[in-house]
Image (spheres, rainbow, N blue to C red):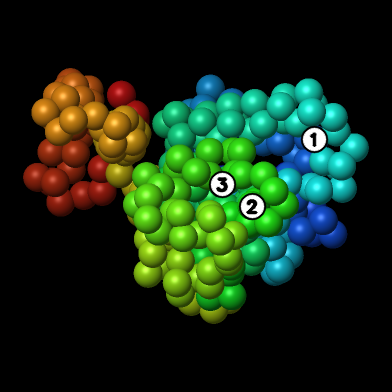
Amino acid sequence: MGQFRVEKSGSTEVWTILGEQRRNAITRAMLAELEQLVHGISASGESRCVLLTGEGSKAFCAGADLKERATMDEAEIRLFLDQLQRTLRSIEKSDAVFIAAINGAAFGGGTELALACDLRIAAPEAELGLPEVKLAIIPGGGGTQRLSRLIGPGRAKDLILTGRKVSSTEALALGLIDRIAPAGRLIETCLEVGAAITANGPLAVSSAKHAIDEGLALPLDEALKLERRYYETTLKSEDRLEGLSAFAERRAPSYKGR
């Protein structure tokens, strides 16, 4: 059986981790399939938004599968971490927009997976945390770096150094997640957000995503030059002209991604 169930809704795909019995923990097989899925959607360009979620109602992803981890030697653990970091970076670099639909517990690698997504929308009962220090290790899938960039170093240290877990309400207040969905409507809410994103110009959406992500590490003057380069991509596109025509003609635009 595959590690993910893949379903399509318009230009959005829903990828569900099929691991309810292990709380959707990250195994080597699951990580390998996720890497293939990300590569596939980036190469095809057919779908422009992905919802990532977990099977069942208890966990989005409870982190690395510790039972499998116990059978791995240090060299295997290093290879696992290399693949985890490579896969999460491929999510960030993809032109597709990734939305973490956090349906339950997201701990350790589960929170790191959510952090690599462009948006994080949680069910009211969701919990998040990076508890690795409780096992005498540190987050190894980018958690120390992505969390501090997202919510600031002080708040990141509060969560990482204590290893504490936070509710969806506190996560929203911290800026760790972007929205809390109404009870029982997580996937519907995420699909609505996905539909709002994919209704827009494909080049504009991907250019805006990359401009934001790449500009974070640059001084403002350099970041503004980066933004201008991405703007030039949209300025020369057929979609820009279609958007203007559709506005003038009071109709919905038909974007082609070129």
Amino acid on which the number 2 mark rests in the picture: Val
Is mark 1 in CB contact (under 8 Å) with mark 2? no
> Which numbered disc, 1 or 2, marks the residue that appears first in the sequence?
1
Q: Residue at x 72, y 52 (%)?
A: 135
Residue 29: x and y, percent? 80, 35
The quadrant in which residue 229 appears is: top left
Along the line of sight, which residue is nearer the eye, 58 or 256? Answer: 58
Q: Which residue is mark 2?
A: 133
> Which numbered disc, 3 or 2, marks the residue that appears first in the sequence?
3
Is mark 1 in CB contact (under 8 Å) with mark 3? no
Q: Residue at x 69, y 63 (%)?
A: 59
Q: Which residue is mark 3?
A: 112
- Estimate how packed mark 2 is, as few (under 14), some (14 to 19) or many (20 or more) residues with alpha carbons within 10 Å: some
- Horizontal side, residue 212 vs residue 48: left or right: left
Residue 201: x and y, percent? 29, 38
Local SS, label 2: helix
Label 1 and label 3: CA atoms lie apart by 18 Å
Quadrant the C terminus occupies: top left
- Estimate how packed mark 3 is, as few (under 14), some (14 to 19) or many (20 or more) residues with alpha carbons within 10 Å: many
Q: Which mark is residue 29?
A: 1
Label 1 and label 2: CA atoms lie apart by 25 Å
Along the line of sight, which residue is nearer the eye, 29 or 164? Answer: 164
